[in-house]
Image (cartoon, rainbow, N blue to C red):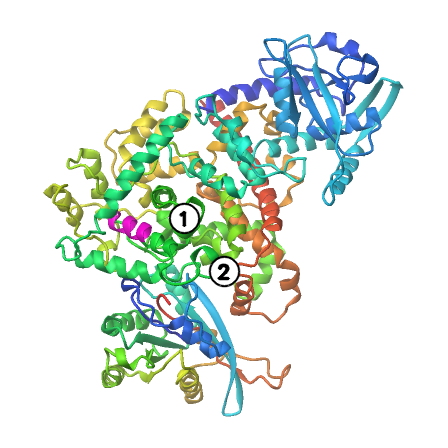
Amino acid sequence: MRPKQNSDTTITAASTTNSSGASSVSRIPTCSSFGSRMSVIGTAHPDVVRIKVYKPNSVNGESESKKFCVDPRLTSYNTLQCLIAQAFDIKTDFVINAIVKDSYGRETITAIWSDWDLDAAFQNVIQESCLKLRYELTHREDGLDDWDFIHIGDFGSNIRWFSVDSRSIIATVNQTAGKAASALNKAINWMYGVNGRRNIQPLGEGDLKKFLDCEGRLIHNIELRQAIFDGGIEPSFRKVVWRHLLNIFPSSMTGTERIEYLKSVNIQYEKLKMRWAHEHESCQEKTETIRLIMQTVRKDALRTDRAFGFYAGSDNNVNVQSLFNILTTYCVNHPSITYCQGMNDYASTLLYVMREEALTYICFCSIMKRIRANFATDGVAIATKFHHLKVLFQAVDPVYWDYFCTADAVNLLFVYRWLLLECKREFPFSDALRVLEVMWSTLPIDNEPPSLSEIPLLATLDSNEKLCFTCASTRPDCSVRRAISCPDLYLSTEPIPMDHYLSRFDNSTEPLFLSSSWPSITRSTNEYCGRHIKRSSTDDYSYYFMSSSQPHSSQYQQQQQQQQRQRSLENSFSVSELSEFDCDAANQPIAATAAQISWITRLPPCNMWLDEDNPFLLFLCISIMLTHRTYLLKQNNLDEQDIAMYFDRYRRRHHADRILNCTRTLYSQYIQWSRKKRMIDDLSQFSAS
Amino acid sequence: MLEKATDRSYGMCVGKSCLLLQFTDKRFQPVHDLTIGVEFGARMITIDGKQIKLQIWDTVNIIEMSFNLCISYYRGAAGALLVYDITQRHTFNHLTSWLEDARQHSNSNMVIMLIGNKCDLFARREVQKEEGEAFAREHGLIFMETSAKTAANVEEAFINTAREIYGKIQEGVFDPTNEVNGIKIGPQHANPRTGERPSSSAEKGGCC
């Protein structure tokens, strides 16, 4: 849906900027007469927006307001803060509220916290009227507020002020610092940015309503994720928000529908569980394979997070039992995946948050849908991650990387657990929840809810499901290396047709899928296909999928990779559609705009990391390593194992907040760079055609 | 040294991590995290008056680990401890295939010690000591029964393996100047206390 449209917008906007922004100094005039020349360029933004700022507790008293005119493309949240601080000579911290009249003439107050909010406020200004703002002084809280002021001061040094009279000032913003930095800041702030404000509160119960419509449909999914990215989720509220974060609901479900949906999940879960948890232990159905699964899972359930209160105590702890039930149900119902160590860590985290077996189960299915490749025995998925990690690490910090080279530690073997468990074990349990939710908020939104079982509960199988099992049986080595690959499942009440078995066991006739993306080929492959073909009329990227409606294995791979690439940036692009595209930057060579983020320039000039499905995780790993940089660089005689043991000592002891901040910054820079790169690709594609 | 044990699919913890913890920290921790990937331990020992730093890798078993990782783990391993659980027959039954894997991916001179762990649980014994000995003889391994819980033979198992590696260095089987063999000469001049350092990258299999 994006590319073509945006290419157009980009070109239009870029040309207007070129004509209007010729001088090296851009102006933020304050004289109100300027407002009359307000014009609208293209369809995007007006040249000038008039702003009227009121002092606290005064709405109409003219004497207590000041007027500004600003160019919305130049004015970031920080600039506005500076302007107001200067204009009213404010020495303490303050917040900015927008006063908006709704269609009934009532005034509503919206807080402006970020470039994002400010942009929205600009968008809402009707032509010929002005944006009314009011600032409110806030009490300074200990700690981080001081930091804010230093920040503003720094920024202010790029702005020159001229007082015209008591009510007006003229400010000029230094071109390099103002324009480029503000464009940069904006681009970062739009998506996964470090917002100007500090002390960002975690998402609480009241906040979720902002993202729902009146019937409880989640309509602002991206904004929800942005909020989670910025501040995480209030612990007591995780149970509700994680369901959305983990994509367990089909899109556009109302609140009532979700309740019904969860009820049905509950019923299905109980049925799936009955496939192994028969009352009659002696039943023939309980095959050797199932017994083996139970045995394996029990061993591991008994040693998962037992030091944590929720799972502590005797082996009869009900939570340990639930963990066992969830994992066993999953493995019995997913014969192509089976149990792998590490799954228990995910399930344990989810159960702690969800507290209900069925709910945990569907969340677990959803996570597994995304990460099952990591558990594949061929190891391709993890090896790819290792490779991406090394490339990024090398770019982010070449000195540190050299240190690892010298120590012969470039295998980064100790990172294996970080990657497989998404760093869950590297932080204290409760901090790990925060880290995970922030990470998950960066992942693509998947509108297809997870399937609860590979083996349908219904007696009939349609062709799609057959396809699924065909794929499953072709997994390389699966029958050879996995002793528990296919439990012999059948229920007398729910017979599974014979051809289901045939398709699973007849390996010889099937093509082999050796790609790392294999595991994401699920029963919905056909649907993906269909969807892409449908979308292709508006989506330039979909032309790959037009070639054949009966694709073969290589095409599957291509599709999957393509799709992954598309999805990996989907969120960020959707956001850019909602706001002004950073058009200036697009017209310049990447190196110029990224000059401030020097590590980006060290990335090799190819696209391969765009195929990474969880770049945040890689930056998280890098951030963890960076926290030990100073210490390690001073050590001369460490070898691979010493370094590994050093990191291992910090297991469950890393400082989550500090590391998350570092990760957010790196990730933002990376996403911004990827977006620009994508945009340039689009442009060249566009001009070529 | 390379230790490697159970087949994950059967999910038996034979006690690899516990053995390592007993050797490096001299303590027994019955409940601990299951090993993901590889974990590490190290201890200085003295053989024939020489200070030797043993580096031990505690790994998941070969079935659990992916192929690429497997190669990295075995790279530069001078020895391996192959662990089974005397109270679980099937962990013993799988030794042949584990051994094949280990030999396939490693240096042919790698010293392999076969260990029957949990010998404190003699009441639940399923594999007789004689069977272990016979298997070791047949495949040219050193054999010991240990208990990570009571620390019986744990020290000996690691030290004997190291001694065997040291012997091979003396015989010239291992070239200590070639790091591919998993042996590094310590900085002798800089630190006279450190002699040779057979840094035996080790693997332990499985799931404990």
Check the residue under mark 1 and report the chain it is in.
A
- Tell me residue A471's x, y (percent): 24, 43
Check the residue under mark 2 and report the chain it is in.
A
Q: Which residue is mark 1?
A: A351
Left or right side of A167 for A567: left
Residue A574 among those drawn in magenta:
no
- Tell me residue B127's x, y (percent): 24, 79
- Name the dominant secondary structure of the magenta segment: helix
Separation of disc 2 and disc 1 at Cα? Answer: 31 Å
The residue that appears at 69% across and 27% down in the rendered structure is: A76
Q: Is residue A337 visible?
A: no
Of the 4 image quadrants, the one containing the N terminus of chain B is: bottom left
Q: Which residue is mark 2?
A: A412
Mark 2 residue crowding within 10 angstroms, few (<14) / some (14–19) / many (20+): some
Instruction: State the residue in front, B24 or B59.
Output: B24
- Tell me, yes or no, whether the two marked residues, 2 and 1, touch with CB atoms within 8 Å: no
Instruction: State the residue in front, A587 or B112.
Output: B112
Callout 2 secondary element: loop
Give above or below for A442 relative to B193.
above
Q: Quadrant of residue A232?
A: top right
Instruction: State the residue in front, A657 or B36.
Output: A657
Bounds of the magenta span? Answer: A325-335
